[in-house]
Image (cartoon, rainbow, N blue to C red):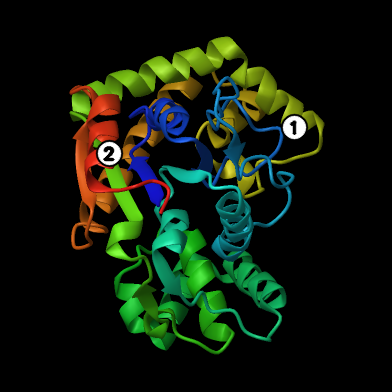
Amino acid sequence: MYIFIAGATSTGKSNIANFISKELNGEILSCDASQVYKHMDIGTNKNRDLETKQHLIDLIEPDQDFTVVDYKRCSNIVLNDLKKINITPIITGGTGFYMDTYLYDQEYGATTINQEEIKKSIEYDLKTKGAIYLYDELKKFDPITAKKTHPNNIRRVIRYLTIVKSGKKPSTLSKTFKLKKENYLFFILTSSINLINEKILKRIHIMIDLGLKEEVEKLLNLGYSFKLKSMQAIGYKEWEPFFYEKTEIDTVIEQININTRQYAKKQRTWFNNQYKNISNVYYIDIEDNPHEQILDLIHKKGNTND
């Protein structure tokens, strides 16, 4: 059986997953798009003190490309290994696109055409013609996808345009639910916005105390620039004006706080809407003894050795 522990940032997913893993002879599969990068620990909130083994972290260098297709390939390897030794996968995180790879048989637009060359061409158009030009191109080739995509979400526009110019429309790619009802339980952690905002700010200050500034400085000294996708993650990109324009550290902290709150809002929207029509989804209030709630539901609803 697959156990999913999902939710917005600062809801305590890792600690709950650690508790459940110990109870069920499980291991954690990280479902976080930033934790795949090496050397980026504090800003991505990797918890190396968990007693449970963690998979799918520290997979690549910060200047390497990593897509949802790569994540799916890596997670399949881990799942097959765990199945052989009867270990329960505890899939934990807040990156919805990664989580979908476990739930759906889905096309991701892979073709025999060299997508890397196509992507480079699109990125050149971004530099020379601007983001609006790219969005207009997406509207021209796949208006359905464009309507669902914000023009300012340039990464997604580029990804969809890459698929389009590889010969497929994102809106036509198939997506089929693949898990049997008896083979998974999906827990979404919830909380009041005020509490989440308090926890976000507290976590940022903890990260500062742990040496987030020094971690970013080390990455820059290793030759990783803020232009990289990895360095555009929240907790890292906000330091660029600090190092190059000499802004105050309080300004950096405030911007990380703003960006994290906005991201948490997007995550809440995703988890409230994306999975509401599938079976075995349970919303768990983190202020109402979530560890025991989840464990009780697992014992009632399924056998983790299935």
Residue at (29% x, 43% y) in the render? 187
Above/below status of 90 relative to 203 = below
Neighbours of disc 1 within 10 Å: few (<14), some (14-19), many (20+):
some
| Towards the viewer: 291 or 182 | 182
Residue 265 screen position, x and y as percent: 28, 41
Residue 57 screen position, x and y as percent: 62, 41
The count of marks equals 2
**Would residue 171 appear left or right of 77 to someone viewing this image?**
left
Residue at (54% x, 23% y) in the render? 50
Corner quadrant of residue 147: bottom left
Residue at the extreme top: 209
Residue at (36% x, 41% y) in the render? 5
Corner quadrant of residue 202: top left
Residue 299's mark?
2
The residue tagged 1 is: 220
Quadrant showing the C terminus: bottom left
